[in-house]
Structures are given as structure tokens and as C-alpha cells.
Image: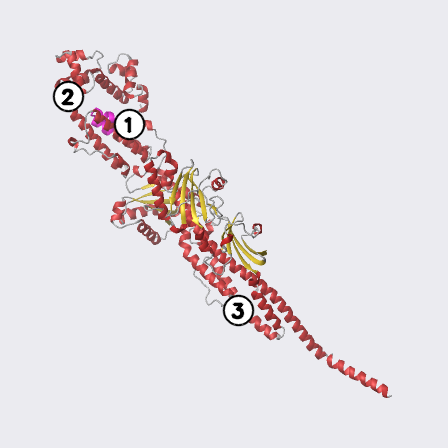
Amino acid sequence: MSEHYEDDKSRAAKASFYHAYFSLKNILIGSYIVLSILVISIFAVVTSKVTEQIITEKENRAVINSLRNIDDRITLKLDNYGTVMNSLAYSESTQTLLKQASELSNQRQLELVNEVYYRMNEVNVTNTEINAIQLMDLSGKKYTLNNGNYYMEGLMDNYFESPLYDQVRSLNGGLFIDYSGAYSRDTNNLTLYRTINELRGTRPIGVIAMSIKKQALGSILFQDSDLPLTSLIDISGITVIDAQKELQGTESAISFNSFTDIASSFQTPLYGDNYFITYLKNKHYDYTLVNRAPIGSIYQDVAFIKKVNFYLILFNLLVVVIIAVFLSRTLVKPINELIGLMNRVRQGNLNIKMTNPPLNEIGILANNFNEMVTTLRNSVPLRKEQLIGKLLLGRTADSGLLQQAKELGLPAFDSAHGVAVVEINDRSNIDASGVSIDDVEILLQSELAAIHSSALLHILDARRVIMIVHGEDEDIVPYLHKMLNEQKNIPVTIGVGRFYASAEHIHESYLEALDALNYKHLFDRNGMIYINDIQAYVYSYEQLDVLEDGIVHAVKYMKEEELLSMIDKLFITFKEQFVSKEAMNRTIVNTYLKIFKLMSDRGIDLFGSEQSNIQVPSINNIHLHAGAHELKREFAAFLQSATRLIEERREKRMNETIAGAIEIIQSRYADNDLSAGNIAKELHISENYFSKLFKHETGVNFSQYVTTVRMEAAEKLLRQTGNKIGEIALQVGYNDANYFSLCFKGAFGVSPGKYREKQGN
């Protein structure tokens, strides 16, 4: 009985124990505790993983942003070098040197090289960064421009025989950069190459190379202290610039095949440790920026978070909520604010910044963001100038060009635009009054703002300003021309190109405007020249030669009325056929030389004391005349003076007997029986004495003089009448038309029929 009682008591105790520990309350509490621990554990694990991803992404973005800052500075620096090379390649001196070097004297070549060297220093960005610049024409002749004490002898050695020739040529004026020194055989320097094309075409006429110190880009690359292990790797996988100097010029230990995107990251074993690799590719200049950081340093924050999460299991859900709220305030809110600011920057708002950034990694991103916005805001004027330069040079194929114009507040260029070039005349007067090309630009900018015009301005050189004008504002060009010339008393000529409907034709309009200015010598001084008013004639040099000979003939035979007529005809021909200034000057110089020879043959010393009242023109200064009117005035004055000198000399040397003989010849040249003997009888002197006296006084024998008179009469009949050649021969004293034609060709170089054709009769 007692045994049964003990068993019952034992069973009751066990039941009480099970009831105490497995009651619903305890189960709920235990379940709650277990669930809380489970939730917190899962939260801790998930938080650790998410935190790892966030920190990794954060580190990646921070490094990418820093690399982008570096890339922007390097790209800007290389663009500046490209601008230097572009300015040199399209300077008039370089074009002349490479196209006409074989025709130039050594002195002129030296002057052009010095002029290009001066231009290099004038446009150079930083003198200490550029070692040397070399030009080479297609024949392999080199012109070296040393910057300071630097010099590189082998910059272009074996250029034509190396693969470098094809690579540079294929870019058609674009930059090719030898980062690793494979071609220049110098690992301490970068070398930039590009072809030089003709100013208005794509035909290559030479090549230009520029040697740059690698430390110039290295200083940009490593000025960021938070990127100590950054490298620049070229397209062939060679480390060009590296924080560890011993790696420079060697093949990169990072697989180049991994660089698949423009910007990305990956992990890889390197130098016996795991590294986090972040890279940014620059396709424009074919290089990649690579930053490497040990995985341990990247995940230090992750390990700390994991440790904190381990202790979080000991806390209740309230702590979890507090931590969540804390994380929300310290991480999510600043990130959202930063993302919002970035979106506003994308929309073109550069007048913003993140205030009161947190004192953590997000604060670093915020500071970098603020610096980036400041850099962008400061670079807007430069970017505008670069974009306008691309439009003028025809580089409209660049991706995003119109979008860049929109972001910079420039017109969309999706409608008609044209180019006008404003050129200042009389620089000596302008300089004396203190007006520079910058002053002219300010005047134009102020006037355009006052009339709310969207026209763009770009200074080309010390004398010219370029205007890109919308088609609807075409009328402002003559308005601005009048404002400068009349209101501001600044003498300018404006060349205007055609208006085109798309941006890719702005380059053509620019070239047309420059071409129009080439004809300003034919138009009114300080005028406007539209390319539509210029007609491209293929003028005949033979026709100009005939006019030259006509002028010399009129001077020779003292026919002042005919001389003035021929001068008018010559300058009318210049204008009607739009003869270039070079061809016009050549014609004037040739005429002067023929007149000088004629005067010398007549024994007249133009430079002697007797002729001190005669203004002898300077051939060297012909090109200095601003226009055809001024040149014509000086030209006519000298020729009239030369005519009067010849006439005075003739009157001094001609005695009455010969004067009488000449009068007989002039009145009876049509008589085929006219002879020295007949005239000698009429003058009552012997034929032998008459011939000698005639030769002495006139400088030619009797028969030559008669032939000359007859040829002059024949030439006049050919120009003024439609008589047949045989009739004209009889009218001037020749019974044989064939003999007449032979004499005429001997005098004028062409037959009578061809001479009449040239005169248009």
C-alpha cells in the first residue's frame, strides 16, 4: 500500500514539474524568447551581409568617384596638350613650313621655325611639362622645337617604317598617345602624335609630336592621398604610371582581359594577398586607371559590424529598433539627400552643395560631391569654349555634343546657323587708342546681351572674333558692323558664310567666312563680304599678261589716255573675276619690273637725284596695301610719272630733223613705198646721214621704227574695227598679208587673228 502511495506521489511530482515547465505561459514566453533570438540572429546575419554589400558598394563608388576626378583632370590636361598641338598644326607658319619648305630659303625656313616656336610658348599650358615638340613633313625633314633646356633627338626616328605611322595616320588628325614609351624608347615620358592636314582639307602634309613628362600626369594621379595604390595602364597592358615607381614601364600583374566595362570592380589574388581592384577606362585616350586595395582594409568596417551584431543578440527588440532608427538617420537619410542632389546636378543645376555632411564615409562622398560640383561650375566657361571650338573644327560627330550644348546653356544647333568672322583693320591705330581684341569681344558681348541674341563669340586670334549666329538673327551682323565702325570708331571687315540647317555644317560656314575675308582687297574698306557674293572664277594668267603688256606699251609710246584706260581695265578684271590678292600683287609687281627695265633701256635713272620728285613704289610693300583702290592710285600715279619722264627724254633727244621725219612717218605709214631714202630727199640730207641720225636720236633704226608705227596702227584697227586681216595689212602699208602677219607676231607674240580673239572682238 505504501509502495503504491510512493509511486502515486512520484507521478504527481513529475506531473507538477511538467506542468510548471510546459505550461502555455512558459511555452509562449519561451517561444517569444526563442523567436526574438531567432529574429535578432537572422537580423544580425542579414545586416552583416547587407552591411558588407553596402560598405563594398560605398567603397567602390568612393574610389570610382575619385578615379573620375583624376580621369577628368588627366583628360583636361591631355585636351590642353591637344589644343597646343592643334593650334600649332593649323597655324599659318606650320602649314607654310610643311607644304612649301622645299621652295623656301634657309633664312625663311629658320624664321618660320622660330615663329612656330614662339607660338608654342604663347599657347603652352605649363612650360615645364612639355619636353620638346617636333614637326616633320612627308619627306621626313624634321623641325625641332625645344622647350627650355629639354631636347629629344629620336622623337620621330624610324617613324615611317614603324607601325606608329599607320596608327597615327588612321586617326586623321586625332591624337595618338604612346604611354609606355614603346615607340619613343623613353619610359620616363609620354609622347603625343598627330597628323597635320591642310587647313581646308584632310590631305596630310606632315606630322607633329610632343614629348610630355610622365610626372606631369603622375602629379595629377597621386595628389589624392586616399588613393595611394593607383596606376595608369595603357591599352597593351603596360603600367605607365604607378605609385610604386619600380612597376613603371612593366607589364601589369592584373589581367587586362578583366577590364570589360567602362568602370567596375573585382577581387583577385595579387602580390601574395587578396586585393579589391577598381578600374575606370578612358576610351577617348585608350588608358585605364586602376586602384588596388587589400581586402582586409576594405572589410574592417564589416568585421566591426559583425562583432556588434553578436552582442545585439543579448539585447531586446527595442535595442534593435533603436539601432535601426539610428542607422536610418545616419546612413539612409544622408544617402537619399546625396542622391537627390546628384539628380539635380544631372538636370543642370550647379548652384547646390550638401551642407552639414556626417562625419563618416558618407561625409567623404559628400565632400567629393561638393568638390565635383565646384569643379564643374568653374569649368563651364572652358567647356563652352571647347565645344564651340569642336563645332568650328567640324568635330560634330562626337557623342553627346548637342546634349553638352544643352547642359552648358548653349543653343541646341538643331536649326539654321551661320558663321561671321569680324576682323580688325589698321592695328596701329587701334593699338594707339588702347582697344584690343578682348575689348572688341566685350563690346560685342554687351550688345548681344542688350538685344537678347543667342549668338556665340569665340576669339580666333589677335585680330579676329568669330560669331556663330542663329538664322533668325542674321540681321544682327550688319547691325554689329555698323555699331563697331560708326558708333565705336573701330574699323572692321566682316566675312559672312552661308547659313546651314544642322550643326555639322557650322565648320563649312566658318571656312566660307574666312574665305570671304580673303577677297576684302576687292571691296570697300571696312565693309561686309558675303560668301554668296563671291564667284569662283578660274582666271587666265595669260589674259593678265596681255593687260600688263598693254600698260607697258602705253607707257613706252607715251599714250597717257590709253594708259589710264588699260589701268581701269586691269583693275576691273581683278574685281569681276575675283582675282586673289596674291595674283593681283604678282601682276602689279611684274608690271613694275617691266617699267623699270623700259626706263633703264631709255637711260632714265629712277633712283637718281634728277628724279627725286618721282615716288618710286616699293615692291616689298605691295602686300601691305589694304585694298585695290589704294593700290590703283599709287600704281597709276607712278605709271603717269614714268610716261612723262619718257616723253621728256624723247623731247630732249629728238632734234627738229628727226621730229620732221617722225611726223612724215606718222602721217604716211600706210604708203608701202615709204623709205629712208625718200624721207632723206624731202629733208635735203643724205640717206646715210639720215639713217645714222635717226638711229642716234630714236634708239632704233628707220625700218624698225616704221614697223613699230605700223604695228601700233594695226593693233588699234584690230581692237576697234572688224576689218579683215588683209584689209588692215593694206591700211598700214603691207601689200603681202602673210608678211604683215609675220611682222605682227614678231611684235606682239601672237598672230593678228589670235590677238583679236583675246581682245574679245
Q: Position of residue 419 (x, y in %)?
A: 38, 45
Residue situated furthest right in the rendering: 1
> What number is the disc on residue 691?
none
Q: Which residue occupies 56% across, 58% down?
A: 276
Asked which secondary structure carries label 3, the reply is helix
Tell me the kind of residue under disc 3.
Answer: Thr
Question: In the rendered image of this protein, does residue 22 appear above or below residue 618?
Answer: below
Question: In the rendered image of this protein, does residue 569 appear above or below residue 33?
Answer: above
Q: Position of residue 103 (x, y in %)?
A: 36, 33
Q: Position of residue 556 (x, y in %)?
A: 22, 25
Tell me the kind of residue under disc 2.
Answer: Met
Earlier in the chain: of badge 2 and badge 3, it is 3
Q: Where is mark 3, residue-wise?
A: 330
Q: Position of residue 413 (x, y in %)?
A: 43, 48
Q: Where is mark 2, residue-wise?
A: 654
Earlier in the chain: of badge 2 and badge 1, it is 1
Query: Is 225 on the left-hand or right-hand side of 268?
Result: left
Placement of the C terminus among the 4 image quadrants? top left
Question: In the rendered image of this protein, does residue 394 appear above or below residue 551?
Answer: below
> What number is the disc on residue 547?
1
Earlier in the chain: of badge 1 and badge 3, it is 3
Asked which secondary structure carries label 2, the reply is loop
Q: Main secondary structure of the magenta part?
A: helix
Determine if residue 498 is in view.
no
Label 2 neighbour load within 10 Å: few <14, some 14-19, many 20+ = some
Magenta residue span: 545-565
